[in-house]
């Protein structure tokens, strides 16, 4: 079951003068966010996917300290969230990847090749000192542009 919440935004409002239609996207296939945010927000045909860790809903990390295992989980969940939003992983136009060790760039890049093939999104890779859950070594957020309008 997909949890979609639509918010119409008044274009005359001084506080919000950019978006006229937004949909919060949460996929039941992915553990609930552990904070006050959605898995993704769809604004028109653009989907902004929140940063994801490879963890259970209780916060315990899957594949602790294993960048390949965590990356596979994250890419699977990214696909599930984009499906819930009405899209596909090939709709991704930009990825931001945070790793705790820049040495993990190679293994992450190999998995990206498998997932995206010739659909190469724009990308940023950043080394950080730590992530929100101990044992997490990678976090990824994404932006996708879908070819269809929101339902």
Image: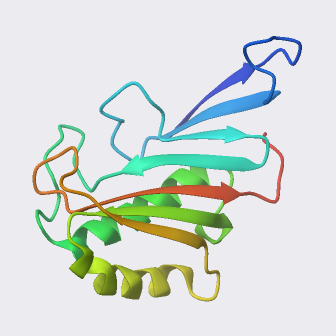
Q: Is residue 88 above or below residue 22?
A: below
Tell me which corner region of the image, top left, top right, bottom left or bottom right, holds residue 117: bottom right
Depth order, front residue of 3/21: 21
User: Residue 43: which quarter of the image?
Assistant: top right
Residue 85 visible in the picture: no
Name the quadrant containing residue 99: bottom left
What sort of colour scheme is used for the picture?
Answer: rainbow
Percent across and percent down for residue 91 are 67, 66
Q: Quadrant location of the C terminus?
A: top right
Q: Is residue 84 left or right of residue 96?
A: right
Identify which residue is drawn at 22% across, 81% down. 103
Residue at 21% from the left image edge and 64% from the top image edge: 100
**Residue 133 appears left or right of 141:** left
Residue 59 visible within the image: yes
| Residue 116 placement (x, y as % from top left) | 55, 80
Q: Position of residue 94 (x, y in %)?
A: 59, 64
From this view, report whether residue 107 is shown above or below residue 148: below
User: Which residue is farthest right?
Assistant: 12
Nearest the eye: 69 or 120 = 120
Q: In percent of the image, x 22 and y 46: which residue is there?
A: 56
- Above or below — where is 101 with respect to 40? below
Q: Position of residue 101 (x, y in %)?
A: 20, 71
């Amino acid at each position: 079951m997909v949890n979609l919440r639509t918010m119409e935004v008044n274009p005359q409002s001084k506080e919000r003068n950019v978006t006229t239609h937004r949909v919060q996207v949460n996929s039941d296939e992915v553990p609930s966010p552990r904070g006050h945010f959605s898995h993704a927000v769809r604004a028109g045909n653009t989907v902004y996917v929140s940063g994801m860790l490879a963890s259970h809903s209780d916060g315990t990390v899957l594949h602790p300290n294993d960048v390949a295992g965590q990356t596979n989980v994250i890419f699977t969940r990214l696909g599930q969230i984009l499906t819930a939003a009405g899209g596909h992983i090939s709709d991704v136009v930009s990825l931001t990847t945070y790793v705790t060790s820049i040495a993990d760039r190679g293994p992450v890049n190999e998995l990206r090749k498998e997932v995206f093939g010739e659909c190469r999104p724009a990308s940023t890779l950043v080394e950080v000192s730590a992530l929100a859950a101990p044992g997490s070594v990678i976090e990824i957020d994404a932006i996708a542009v879908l070819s269809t309008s929101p339902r």
